[in-house]
Amino acid sequence: MENPYLQLKHLSETRKSCRKFKPDEIPQDITDKILSVAANSPYAGGSRSWGVTTVKETAVKERLVLAIQEKVRATAESMERESADLFVKYSQNFMFFREAPLLIIPYFKVTPVMRSLLRESVTESLLQWERDNSVKSISCVSMLILLAAESLGLGACYMTGPLIAEREISEILNIPPGREVGAIIPIGYKL
């Protein structure tokens, strides 16, 4: 077996954000391998307050795209024309995931432990710190997903732009209440 450090170093050097995918379906056993690596992710705050969901269905991906497009349109309406045009053009980067055969969507539970412990004494900065810890946990999960995909010969990309429509994405994907989507990770065979 090759030196594990060298293997990890190689994966980290060869892994690049992939935005174009072959249409070939990802077999379930490959998806399971990626998810089993993600399950070993470290987490902040002393408890695993995250989960993942997967999407393979084209119709669901299209619903996500429509929700993002609508949110972009509504956001652009409040901008000056030149800024709106730039924003709408840039937002096209939020939707290339529709071409990927697999999406893995990590989400986190908003756990207001500080509110329970400190009640009226809790500050907004403590609540923000607590939420930030959940976001950091999602980052760890996401990195393992990206490295696992690369190790299996797949391309992937860490996307947060689509989260402009996070509430709508959560509804479409039936994310449990009290949880927030942390990213969309499209995965597929590289073109």
Image: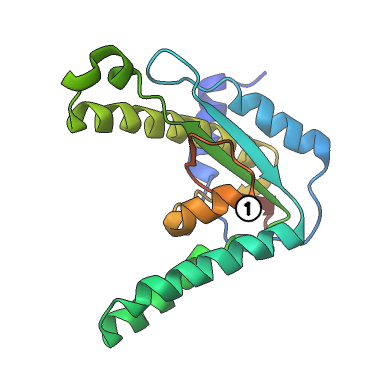
Report which residue position mark 1 lands on: 172
Question: Which residue is at a point 70% across and 57% down the rendered structure image?
Answer: 60
Whole-percent x, y for residue 46 in the image: 41, 12
Which quadrant: the C terminus?
Answer: bottom right
For label 1, the SS is helix
- Mark 1 neighbour class, 10 Å CA radius: few under 14, some 14 to 19, many 20 or more: some
Picture layout, residue 147 above or below residue 22? above
Which quadrant: the N terminus?
Answer: top right
Whole-percent x, y for residue 35 in the image: 67, 30
Whole-percent x, y for residue 44 in the image: 39, 20
Question: Which residue is at a point 49% across and 23% down the rendered structure image?
Answer: 49
Question: Which residue is at a point 38% across and 31% down the rendered structure image?
Answer: 136
Question: Which residue is at a point 67% across and 56% down the rendered structure image?
Answer: 190
Q: Residue furthest bottom?
A: 81
Picture layout, residue 155 above or below residue 97? above
Whole-percent x, y for residue 51 in the image: 58, 30
